[in-house]
Image: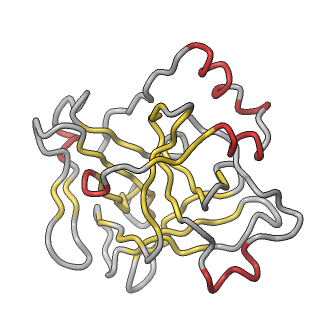
């Protein structure tokens, strides 16, 4: 099932110059540049979306912007099947869809980890698990973010593990078309390995 591509929200010219020069922004600068602001969790659904023949899946995030038409339907049960209704109409201004690292990234507290972590869905025999996986040595530990809470290969809802939530990336107080998979602090069970001494207090590159 192919869905229309979401276009990121526009920024003022000066902001674009800073944000789009991703290659020249250090991890520390990126965390200082962007903020994480609250959003309405009930407007969103995280989905393990099948790829190809369904043996693999990727993270999709759908947002209901306006109540004009439903953007998705979540069935009861665990795992919960999700019907992406936004694939059946022009959802401009009604829904948002985030399908890759341009639309979402990991953040822990003040650390923007867009450049050092990736989000991947792993299919298991009895579950589908969303993992935050480090892409650089010393970036931190691998973390389980969400689960479908049961096996399946269709569009399935991913339910956050305790401590995780969605936040909106913001620049200068203005919300951007990018969301964070966010946790206030590193999971307690992982604190001994979570923040290596060599890692700066902030990390990640912008992915507007």
Q: Residue furthest front?
A: 173
Residue 42 rendering spot, x and y as whole percentages: 25, 57
Q: Residue at x 35, y 67 (%)?
A: 158
In this rendering, is residue 139 above or below 65? below
- 151 or 17: nearer the viewer: 17
Instruction: Name the residue at 87% across, 69% down.
Output: 197
Residue at the spot 49% in from the left edge and 58% down from the top edge: 181
Residue 101 image point, x, y percent: 55, 46
Q: Position of residue 126 (x, y in %)?
A: 38, 86
Apparent side of residue 173 relative to residue 110 in the rendered image (left or right): left
Nearer the observer, 159 or 42: 42
Tally the marks.
0
Q: Which residue appears at 60% of the width and 69% of the height? A: 185
Q: Residue furthest right?
A: 198
Asked if residue 91 lies left or right of residue 21, the reply is: left
Color style of the picture: secondary structure
Q: Quadrant of residue 124?
A: bottom left
Q: Residue lying at the far top in this picture: please name it.
A: 13
Figure check: 179 above or below 122:
above
Q: Is residue 147 above or below residue 171?
A: below
Instruction: Determine whether, in the image, residue 64 is placed left or right of residue 147.
Output: left
Q: Which image quadrant is residue 83 in?
A: bottom left
State the image coordinates of residue 129 (x, y, percent, origin top left).
Answer: 46, 74
| Residue closer to the observer: 201 or 73 | 201
Quarter occupied by the C terminus: top right
């Amino acid at each position: 099932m192919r869905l229309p591509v979401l276009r990121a929200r526009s920024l003022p010219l000066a902001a674009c110059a800073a944000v789009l020069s991703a290659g020249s922004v250090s991890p520390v600068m990126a965390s200082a540049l962007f903020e994480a602001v609250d959003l309405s969790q009930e407007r969103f659904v995280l989905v393990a979306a099948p790829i190809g023949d369904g043996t693999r899946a990727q993270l999709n995030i759908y947002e209901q912007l306006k109540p004009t038409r439903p953007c998705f339907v979540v069935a009861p049960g665990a795992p919960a099947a999700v019907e992406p209704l936004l694939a059946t109409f022009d959802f401009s201004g009604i829904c948002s869809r985030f399908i890759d690292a341009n639309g979402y990234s990991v953040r822990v507290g003040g650390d923007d980890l867009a450049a050092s972590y990736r989000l991947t869905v792993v299919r298991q025999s009895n579950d589908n698990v969303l993992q935050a996986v480090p892409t650089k040595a010393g970036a931190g530990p691998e973390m389980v973010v969400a689960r479908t809470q049961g096996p399946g290969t269709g569009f399935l809802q991913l339910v956050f593990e305790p401590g995780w939530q969605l936040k909106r990336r913001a620049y200068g107080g203005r919300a951007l078309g990018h969301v964070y998979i966010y946790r206030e602090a590193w999971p307690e069970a992982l604190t001994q390995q979570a923040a290596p001494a060599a890692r700066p207090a902030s990390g990640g590159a912008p992915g507007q």
